[in-house]
Image: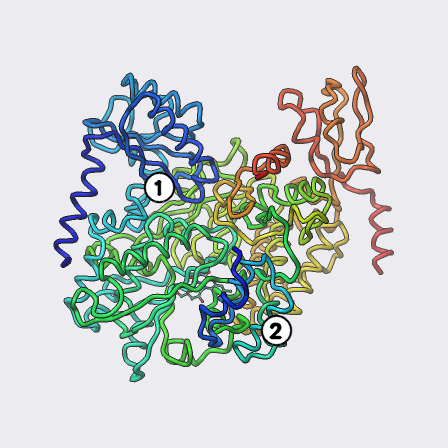
Amino acid sequence: MGKDLREILSFYKGDRSNLIPILQDIQANFGYLPENAILEISKFTKIPESEIYGVATFYAQFRFTPIGKKHIMVCEGTACHVKGADQIMEGIERYLDIKEGETTPDLECSLESVACLGCCALAPCAMVNEKVESNLTLKDIKKLFSKNSK
Amino acid sequence: MNFSEMIQQAKEEYNSLYQNEELVILIGSATCGNSAGASIVSSTIQEELEKHNINYKIVEVGCIGLCYAEPIVTIIKPGSPAIFYGNITPDMAVELVDSYIINNDPLLDYALGTFEDGGIDKIPHIFDIPVLKPQVRMILRNCGFIDPKNILHYIANEGYSGFVNALGMKPQQVIQTIKKSGLRGRGGAGFPTWQKWQFCLDSAEKTKYIICNADEGDPGAFMNRSLLESDPHSALEGLLIAAYATGAKAGYIYCRAEYPLALERLKHAIMQMREFRLLGDNILDSGFSFDIEIKEGAGAFVCGEETALIASIEGRRGMPRTRPPFPSTSGLFGKPTVINNVETLASVSLIMQKSPHEFAEYGTRQSKGTKTFSLVGKVKKTGLIEVPLGTTLREVIYDIGGGIQNDGDFKAVQIGGPSGGCLPESFIDTPIDYDSLNLAGAIMGSGGLVVMDQNTCMVDVARYFLEFTQKESCGKCVPCRLGTKQMLDILVDITEGKGKPNDINLLVELAEAIKLASLCGLGQTAPNPVLTTIRFFKDEYGAHIQERMCPSLLCRELISYIVLPDKCQSCMLCLKSCPVDAIIGGKKQIHVIDQTKCIKCGTCFEVCSEKFAAVEKVSKTKGKNEKLDDEKIDK
Ligand SMILES: Cc1cc2nc3c(=O)[nH]c(=O)nc-3n(C[C@H](O)[C@H](O)[C@H](O)COP(=O)(O)O)c2cc1C
Ligand code: FES
């Protein structure tokens, strides 16, 4: 955290194959891909901005708006689906009063879905800031937001 | 340090763990263990031991595959065999310290098994418990027993001896050895590994690449994650061997970003390889040089496909291209490239450490060796398992998995992920090998087994997979981009009670066209889950289309929740938890759900105490007239 754009770019040679790692690095630092960052990357790699957007929008990982302090990703994988992931997602949507893909206006929480977290044996799961929470029930939703409230 | 000195040092360090003078505690700390609360359990144990001034060593190990029993704690007291304990809560942890560690009572009720023959009375050997007994642990041999962050633990268990053996051979001999083993790719297609390597070795190009595919995109499958978290060097050694055999000087590991712990373990393992001169220039003074770079995936399922994966490493949109040319002739940056799955590479290490015969001893004529599977869904004992190819679905689900959760009825098992199929009860004795599964209409895939019971709606499962493939379709070819969308729309209609009589024929017709005309494996296999569910569960489609009901009580538009007046105890629990205040009633007043307000979230169903079971899900067949009305509107 806290690195500025120039510092991040200085780690790279600027080859085309650096593009995705650069985008990932920037998102890890800023939480999203700010517009000016794309411009700077374009200057640095000599790849047109339009192409950078082309690449960034292809991958589910990248976002173009700021994200909440608590980033929740509800698993929608097969194992979680058959164990009722939809209900969990909706439960969280109701609790936070936002829809999947949105961030609360106070920038506290963002809600996204993810294809699978690899914790399928303990489905249904969700990842909260890189920590996987498993065996979720509707009753756990409140706890999810108090336990991790740092 | 030469290799034999490394082994010496490694053995000393590893043996001190199991033949120790100090108390050693192993904590299962893979993603599954951590999510089940391993770290709280670990810190509770440490606090408790410190309170009693007991010296100890805590080792964070990987996952032995008994995910249903996480968090798992293994206690090795000096002079006693290791005892594995499952489902440990912080309270139980305190109890374990007081009863077993201090007072020598091993608390039989909490014990899963021991780890030495003739161990402790009344506790079975861990490999004799029902979940593990039918398994053959070759790939997973180290998982849960070694510290994945310590390369010496791997070396002490024959690690890197396979690579050293390879260095003593010519590349062609290594390929010959792999050929003898009969190893076929574990990433899904089952292509003979040696053949891929041979193409690459035969190429006259100077620059060649090798890629380890750790993208594991199949939802519901986690074999690669677990292996990388628990024994990362087994895949890395395989990568070294593959590089040596094909003449590649640079390698990549493409690992998905959704696996932060696996990535961390890989980074650490690669750093240790460098330290021990198992990576870089002139590895172990052999004259062979090789380096590995990790590439993090960015959340696209299609990037598991080899040509898309290559495009992604090159910094482009991850879109597949037509083959030929195959990557083995023109791959990464236009150079010959071998792409192998994590488990394929781990099998390579195993074959080179032991012998091709020991590997080929297991399996069937066409499918050699053992294979790992993630056994999940509505089965009692979920986890990561390893069995010889050719083991039947019944053995896996009932003997290993312990049968269906809550003693429900088996309905189907989904195998092969979004490209695979759902097999019904009548196929439960199918052996799991490449050819038998193809024959049954499913595929081996990477190894996800999702078990479904009477509460799983097969039409919903088909809709679920189509939604997934439709979302993940890269959009390059029309049949996949538009065809899957059409199929999805039809399936959504059916699950919402708006299906039309001809829908099934239309689905089959679309499916055949998409299979035939799509560019890559994603589109070519996307219709499989729909085709198999239509083939085996046509009556469920019929119920949705003709009777507008969901027999499994799952499809939301076709069910409602009601409170059974004779069972309701007027406890107010559901009434208070209802998020939309749809429940009317009061103390001493039977509750009623206002169907016009109900959003069918299922909260009341979940909160109503099992003792009362007063909330029920129902799906009623609509009357004939109503049905006709619907159809008129549709037209
Ligand atoms: C849509 C699609 C997704 C795939 N995803 C993966 C994957 O996640 N992991 C993998 O190892 N192979 C995946 N494959 C298969 C690879 O294309 C390739 O066959 C495999 O990595 C080769 O390795 P193997 O010979 O060791 O099996 C996928 C294929 C397709 C068509
Ligand atoms: S299906 Fe949810 S973690 Fe894999």
- Assign a secondary structure to mark 2: helix
Q: Point out the residue furthest to the bottom here.
A: B204
Label 1 residue near ligand 2, CB within 8 Å: no
Q: Which amino acid does label 1 sit on?
A: Ile
* Chain bearing mark 2: A
Parent chain of label 1 = B
Residue under label 1, please give it: B64
Which residue is at the front of the view, B75 or B474? B75
Identify the amino acid type marked 2. Answer: Leu
Do the numbered discs 1 and 2 sit on residues whose CB atoms are within 8 Å? no
Give the percent coordinates (x, y) of residue B358: 21, 54
Residue sitting at x 86%, y 46%: B625
What residue is pinned by disc 2?
Answer: A39
Q: Residues within 10 Å of mark 2 (few under 14, many from 20)?
A: some
Q: Distance between the residues labelled 1 and 2?
A: 48 Å
Q: Where is residue B93 in the image (x, y as percent from the top left)?
A: 39, 25
Residue B91 left/right relative to B623:
left
Q: Do labels 1 and 2 share a chain?
A: no
Q: Residue at x 74, y 32 (%)?
A: B578
B534 or A52: nearer the eye?
A52
